[in-house]
Image (spheres, rainbow, N blue to C red):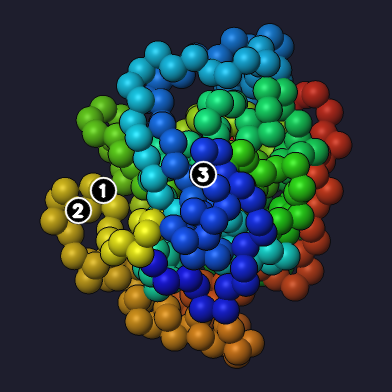
Amino acid sequence: PAAEPGAPAAEPGTPGGASAAAEEQACPADMKLVEGEYCTEVEHSCLRSWYDKSNKKTVCEEFAPTPGRCTGEKVKKRYCIDTYEWPNKKGERPEVMNRFHQAQVKCAAAGKRLCTESEWTLACEGPEIKPFPYGYSRDATKCNGDHLWDDPDMKKVAKRDPAELARLWKGVRSGSQAQCISDYGVADLPANTDEVVASETTGGWRGKFDSVHTGGPWYKGVRNQCRPKIYTHDEGFYYYFLSFRCCAEPDDKTTDPRTPRQIQEGWSMDRVERLAQFTVEQMRGKLELKQQGKCECRATDILCKTMCGTLLGPNAVDATPGGGAPAASTSGEKR
């Protein structure tokens, strides 16, 4: 698969069960090789937890320090995954405010595809099926979380108001969290920005949409684990803390940019492009302009700014991981 134009070499990392040399041969420099077994059902023993009333979620702060017990099926997987969230560049902010199909077209423009929910989970859990990429105790200073809810003005968010998006930004730069790295060498998976992935679920309420959210955002009252998922947002959903990353087939195999569901239902990429409101070729053009520092848009051209990744206002300030939030949560995001 082709790497995004202008993407730097990824940070070195040795994934579980694969040598660095094999990884270098199997995946582009800006991606990590994940080769292992994904377990469909896992059990962990929670030792310490608390209940967030606003989210109606139990947040486990500490699990028993033993590998997760696989109670389901084990599925062998081998694939490449971006080291960081889009634009997959260390030192840049994860890009937010993309709809599902827009994220999909962006991955396609880089010769990649959206990751599936199981691919994201395996990359996060590692071979030991850990609940967090860094271990068994939740730590919002390792993967940026626990910031207080800040009452977004949804009318301004819908208008992509740059000042409001800047005010709401509580993220940190890709690759700035030295301990938020999985055993496969993949960075910034849970917390900081939430991520959208492609569904592999069929039937029932969990299989309603192709869009699945994983990892959880930077707020207090959020689990920020590898495995929990949100299945209730459709493909038109976008948000100020929702980002994505891309995956691809290893070993120079052709990568189909469509999701598993789209392949099964016989979708064409033309259909995806119509929903995204821009084509793969148009996005490739924007990536070339970004590489040259020339991806410029009129202030009112929301689609252009979405493609260029310049919706966030200039006054955005990167957060301090951990947020310093008190135990009582006022978060409004159900995660």
Q: Residue at x 76, y 64 (%)?
A: 316
The residue lying toward the viewer, choosing from 80 and 292, is 80
Labelled disc at residue 260: 1
Query: Disc 1 residue type?
Result: Pro
Q: What's the distance in space between the residues labelled 2 and 1, CA to CA?
A: 5 Å
Residue 49: percent from left, percent from top: 69, 14
Asked if one can make out residue 107 in the rendered structure from this viewpoint, the answer is yes
How many neighbours does mark 1 have within 10 angstroms: few (below 14), some (14-19), or many (20 or more)? some
Q: Which residue is mark 2?
A: 263
Q: Secondary structure at mark 2?
A: helix
Given residues 34 and 241, the one toward you in this image is 34
Vertical order, 47 against 235 (above or below):
above
Q: Whole-Å distance between the Cαs marked 1 and 3?
A: 26 Å
Q: Position of residue 2 (x, y in %)?
A: 42, 71
In this view, 286 is above or below 239: below
- Quarter in which the C terminus is drawn: top right
Q: Is residue 207 above or below residue 267?
A: above
- Labelled disc at residue 18: 3
